[in-house]
Image (cartoon, rainbow, N blue to C red):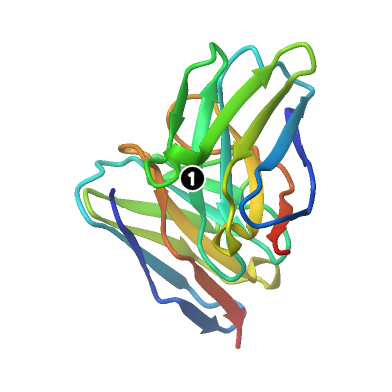
Amino acid sequence: DIQMTQSPSTLSASIGDRVTITCRASQSISSWLAWYQQKPGKAPNLLIYKASSLDSGVPSRFSGSGSGTEFTLTISSLQPDDVATYCCQQYNSYPMTFGQGTKVEIK
Amino acid sequence: QVHLQESGPGLVKPSETLSLSCTVSDGSIRSDYWNWLRQPPGKGLEWIGYIYYSGITNYNPSLKSRVTMSLDTSKNQFSLKLSSVTAADTAVYYCARQKGQNWFDPWGQGTLVTVSS
């Protein structure tokens, strides 16, 4: 199985800050990576697919980059509505696997 | 837009079989990949498996010996059975669609299943 490792596990930042979350794969997954936002008690919501493609309706302050084994999710200007846990998912091969999540809080 | 909704018992006894259904509305189950995933309390997401609209299945090897998925096209539903459950199977269970073998979208709201006597 491909292991997905996210860092940090928790992040505290101020409104308006630029926030970056990293996801590393245990082997190359090309650009076959998705990012999700999960608010407490809710299902994950797709933000980005194919490493850098923004899903419809997702605010432009979210962006993704990377390929191979290292990927990043960036929030250009953190907003109160962005408080959530973010996780990555690889779809290069089965079984599909997820990172353990990064919890984003407001400082 | 397709909407998914899980249903089933919230409490299952150890060694018994967990059974859940996912009803698909505003769309047809006669296409795409239909998935089950789970998330133990405070932990990350785990993919359980999918059933393709043709009936082909693909299960996570870690659960394969205990998982069965099926489709009911007349009800626009698909189902999960997980046998011989233990406390480690306590989780929020989600159903989700894949249009290809890629990302999951949309997801159902999730249903908490607790394994306890």
Q: Is residue B115 above or below residue A32?
A: below
Q: Is residue A100 above or below residue B30?
A: below
| Residue A92: image location, x then y, percent | 31, 38
Depth check, front residue: B83 or A23: B83
What residue is rendered at 73% in x and 56% in y?
Answer: B112
Q: Amino acid at mark 1?
A: Trp
Assess disc 1: are there few (<14), some (14-19) or many (≥20) residues with their C-alpha within 10 Å of its C-alpha.
Answer: many
| Residue B55: image location, x then y, percent | 54, 15
Q: Furthest-bottom residue in view?
A: A107
Q: How many numbered marks does the figure carry?
A: 1
- Report whether B16 appears left or right of A25: right
What residue is rendered at 21% in x and 48% in y?
Answer: A68
Q: Is residue B48 above or below residue B115?
A: above
> The N terminus of chain B appears in which quarter of the rendering?
top right
What residue is rendered at 75% in x and 19% in y?
Answer: B76
Q: Chain of mark 1?
A: B
Q: Secondary structure at mark 1?
A: strand
Residue behind mark 1: B47
Depth check, front residue: B73 or A92: B73
| Residue B16: image location, x then y, percent | 66, 48
